[in-house]
Amino acid sequence: MISQIIEDILLDHEENLIIDGHKVATVRAENTCLHALMILNSVGYSSIPVLDREGRVAGQISTPLIFSGIKDELQYNWDKLAERRVSEVMSTNVAVLDENCALEDILHNLVNHSFLCLVDSGGFFRGIITRRELLKRVNYLAHEFDRYTEMYSN
Ligand code: 4BW
């Protein structure tokens, strides 16, 4: 259980904690690995969410996963980049939470995942919460905690 003061400080910010889905770099499960590699290279993130045709979270993809997926026993088969689909090489180890989930779930999951995918009640992708956004707030909390406790005690 998280103390109410801590929860208020972490959540009460002008900036949205969730990065809206429209601003998140994603690829589709049916895209080729070549396409995913080009997206990853152009956005600069090490891993990004994979969505299915309906816009639900299917997994996550990274350059190492793509390279592992096109490797034969001893060498890389570069022709496979244009043949293999993202769905064949992606990882399904991605944290997916309801967009109205509790702060406690967000904190727990960000320990092991650098970003969390948020979905609506229909399971459709709405955006991500990143470790960076949450850590910015933890940093603020560490510096402003005394001021808040004074306010709460008055
Ligand atoms: O292009 C970048 N812009 C900015 N502003 N920060 C970046 C960029 N690339 C990396 N960073 C920084 C961030 O602090 O390096 C951290 C690790 O990036 P990552 O994991 O290994 O690519 C970033 O930390 P973060 O903001 O907490 O993001 C955590 C992870 O969430 C990223 C990436 O996998 C994913 N991510 C973040 N923003 C994204 C995104 N994926 C797709 N689209 C976005 N807009």
Image (cartoon, grey):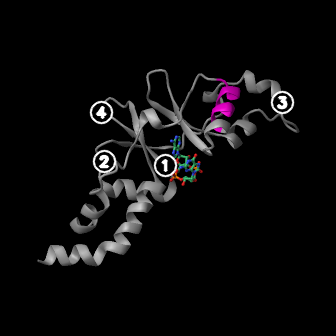
Q: Earlier in the sequence, mark 2 or mark 1?
A: 2
State the residue position of label 1: 115
Helix, strand or loop at mark 2: loop
Mark 4 to mark 2 CA distance (whole Å): 11 Å
Label 1 beta carbon less than 8 Å to ligand 1: yes
Quarter of the view holding residue 5: bottom left
Q: Amino acid at mark 3?
A: Asn
Mark 4 to mark 3 CA distance (whole Å): 41 Å
Q: Is residue 28 above or below residue 132?
A: above
Q: Amino acid at mark 2?
A: Cys
Circle 1 Cα neighbour tier, 10 Å, few/some/many (<14 / 14–19 / ≥20): many
What number is the disc on residue 101? 2
Residue 30: image location, x then y, percent? 59, 22
Q: Amino acid at mark 4?
A: Ser
Label 3 beta carbon less than 8 Å to ligand 1: no
State the residue position of label 3: 77
What number is the disc on residue 133? none
Q: Residue at x 30, y 47 (%)?
A: 101
Q: Nearer the viewer, mark 3 or mark 1?
A: 1
Mark 3 to mark 1 CA distance (whole Å): 31 Å
- What's drawn in magenta, residue-wise? 32-40
State the residue position of label 4: 121
Q: Nearer the viewer, mark 1 or mark 4?
A: 1
